Image: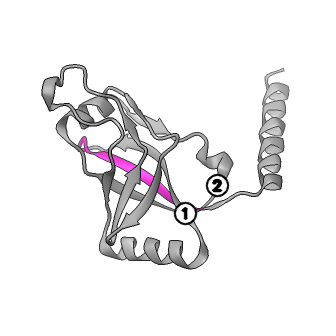
Amino acid sequence: MQKINIRNKKASFEYEFIETFVAGIQLFGTEIKSIRAGKANIGDSFCYFNANELYVKEMHISEYKFGSYYNHEEKRERKLLLNRKELDKLDRKTKESGLTIVPLRIFLNEKGFAKMEIALCRGKKHYDKRESLKQRDHKIEIDRMMKR
């Protein structure tokens, strides 16, 4: 089985992660086939609560090439599947302290089901982002020195 690992690269730059969770995704048949082909993007997506259920919005899954009229909408809202305890905890934290929930990556587990890793995050300030850039540049410089 091939490894599918679709990442949200902007998330670590924009947010400070507090806690991570792994959630199932409620998908149609053509959506899982597109994910297995690697045709998904979660760069602009975010999670929100609606009637005590967690949904992901702006997640783009391309239409399946052989889907005919059974194909799905590319940017529809998709329900995330978590335990009630986890949902209540996330809902409470987002309402109390102004935290947000951001998708980090989509992957396939050993049974072949699509899972999404989500994180409870706090937005970084401008100076935190500059610090992240400095650390990344410093790491690149050290790697160059180690090669020589």
Residue 94 rendering spot, x and y as whole percentages: 52, 71
Residue type pointed to by label 1: Thr
Q: Nearer the viewer, residue 78 or 142?
A: 78
Q: Is residue 47 left or right of residue 78?
A: right
Residue type pointed to by label 2: Tyr
Residue at the spot 63% in from the left edge and 48% down from the top edge: 12
Comes first in the chain, label 1 or label 2? 2
Q: Is residue 59 above or below residue 49?
A: above
Q: Quadrant of residue 136?
A: top right
Membership of 54 in magenta stretch: no
Q: Residues within 10 Å of mark 1 (few under 14, many from 20)?
A: many
Q: What kind of element bears circle 2?
A: strand
Residue at the spot 20% in from the left edge and 31% down from the top edge: 71
The magenta region covers 111-121
Q: Nearer the viewer, residue 12 or 125?
A: 125
Number of marks drawn: 2
Residue 105 visible in the displayed image: yes
Residue 114 rendering spot, x and y as whole percentages: 30, 44
Residue 106 rendering spot, x and y as whole percentages: 40, 43
Residue 77 rendering spot, x and y as whole percentages: 33, 49
Residue labelled with disc 2 = 15
Q: Which mark, by number, is residue 8? A: none
Q: Is residue 101 left or right of residue 25?
A: right
Instruction: Give the main secondary structure of the magenta stretch.
Output: strand
Q: Is residue 9 left or right of residue 141?
A: left
Tell me if label 1 and label 2 are in contact, CB under 8 Å.
yes
Instruction: Give the spatial CA distance, label 1 vs label 2.
Output: 9 Å
Q: Quadrant of residue 96?
A: bottom right
Residue labelled with disc 1 = 100
Residue 1 visible in the displayed image: no
Q: Is residue 88 above or below residue 132?
A: below
